[in-house]
């Protein structure tokens, strides 16, 4: 740790959905936080600026606009970083099929760059945002970290597997503690506007059709963002081994049809459904075993799906009233 009393955490992608919540949590507990984010226009940049706007008055917060593929920029970051949470990545399964080269450039080379920076600065704690998509079409549910038969079916998923493996190499060679967290469908306030819960809720409120791919039987392990942040904080505090892969989910599944019905109940309005064919790269089921996270971090999701939706609705309506939603 640096000589200051406050531990210094670098969060890549820290202006995004999960990263901004993590920054808020760490700042509230007295950490110094540096956020690196390229403000990629994958979704409106203004939404990311809103996510972090209140932190600029905090003397423990520093924002750096830049890209993880820019090694010169990474070398210019502060020298006293204690821990890295690497969330930055090109997101989305379907877009990765359209542009796999760009996904590999950012998600694989960018992760390599971050690990190289950690090696050069002797940063010993590195938390990596992996994804449930690495399991692909694995039929063994709930998905366990001990099941090494990964079957990714999109470039995005393959890039996350690559990040886990690069992390193992750096952990072995350079003594970096590398914790890969496989996030399962995260939702809550500030969720990206292209993700289903946010997109569907906004369209239902407007009385417009929602695009539903397939027959509604696909199931996801929806995990509330506050619980994900608690899991990341657990990974930052973890010291017992040098390399771990850990699922962060809710340990339950909800079908697409059930998810839509729950949004209807929370919003108080029926959805107009535009039924579309299933999409390439989409998996039929995600379902996390969270036993390992409980054992290593004391991870225990606290937010029910319905309560998470209620919290999301309150944020969505408040944001709309302030003109802050896309």
Image (cartoon, rainbow, N blue to C red):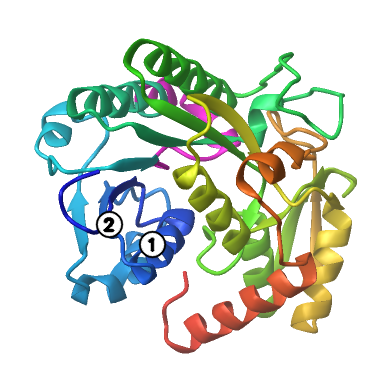
Say which element carries label 2: strand
Q: Who is closer to the viewer here, 141 or 3? A: 3
**Category of crowding for the residue at label 1, using alpha-carbon neighbours closer than 10 angstroms: few (below 14), some (14–19), many (at least 20):** some
Q: Which residues are magenta?
A: 86-105
Mark 2 = which residue?
33
Q: Viewer-proximal residue, 79 or 140?
A: 79
On the image, the x and y values in percent for residue 12 come to: 33, 44
Where is residue 92? Give x, y as percent.
55, 39
Callout 2: few (<14), some (14-19), or many (20+) C-alpha neighbours within 10 Å? many
Q: Nearer the viewer, residue 96 or 8?
A: 8
> Do tag 2 and tag 1 residues touch (Cβ < 8 Å)?
yes
Residue 207 visible from this viewpoint:
no
Q: On screen, 78 above or below 180?
A: below
176 displayed left or right of 304 = left
Q: Secondary structure at mark 1?
A: helix
Q: Earlier in the sequence, mark 2 or mark 1?
A: 1
Q: What residue would you read off at disc 1? A: 26
Name the residue furthest bottom.
Answer: 321
Residue 282 found in image quarter: top right
The residue lying at 21 percent from left, 71 percent from top is 56
Picture residue at 66% right of the left edge, 48% below the top: 185
Q: Is residue 237 visible?
A: yes
Mark 2 → mark 1, Cα distance in angstroms: 7 Å
């Amino acid at each position: 740790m640096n000589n200051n009393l406050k531990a210094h955490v670098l969060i890549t992608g820290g202006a995004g959905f999960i990263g901004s919540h993590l920054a808020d949590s760490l700042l509230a507990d007295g950490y110094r936080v540096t956020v690196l984010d390229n403000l990629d226009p994958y979704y409106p940049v203004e939404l990311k600026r809103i996510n972090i706007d209140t932190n600029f008055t905090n003397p423990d917060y520093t924002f750096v606009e830049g890209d993880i593929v820019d090694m010169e920029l990474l070398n210019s970051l502060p020298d006293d970083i204690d821990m890295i949470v690497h969330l930055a990545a090109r997101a989305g399964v379907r877009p990765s099929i359209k542009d796999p080269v760009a996904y590999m450039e950012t998600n694989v080379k960018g992760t390599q760059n971050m690990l190289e920076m950690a090696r050069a600065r002797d940063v010993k704690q590195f938390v990596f945002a992996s994804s449930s998509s690495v399991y692909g079409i694995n039929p063994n549910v709930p998905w366990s970290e001990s099941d090494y038969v990964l079957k990714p079916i999109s470039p995005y998923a393959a890039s996350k597997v690559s990040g886990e493996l690069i992390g193992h190499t750096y952990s072995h060679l350079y003594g970096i503690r590398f914790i890969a967290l496989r996030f399962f469908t995260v939702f809550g306030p500030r969720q990206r506007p292209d993700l289903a819960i946010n997109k569907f809720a906004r369209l239902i409120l407007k009385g417009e059709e929602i695009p539903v791919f397939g027959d509604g039987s696909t199931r996801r392990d929806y995990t509330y963002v506050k619980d994900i942040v608690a899991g990341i904080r657990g990974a930052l505090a973890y010291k017992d081994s040098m390399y771990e892969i850990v699922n962060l989910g809710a340990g339950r599944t909800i079908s697409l049809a059930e998810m839509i019905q729950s949004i209807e109940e929370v919003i108080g309005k029926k959805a107009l459904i535009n039924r579309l064919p299933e999409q390439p790269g989409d998996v039929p089921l995600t379902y996390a075993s969270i036993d390992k996270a409980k054992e290593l971090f004391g991870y225990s999701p606290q937010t029910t799906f319905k309560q998470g939706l209620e919290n999301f609705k309150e944020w969505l309506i408040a944001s709309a009233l302030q003109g802050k939603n896309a």
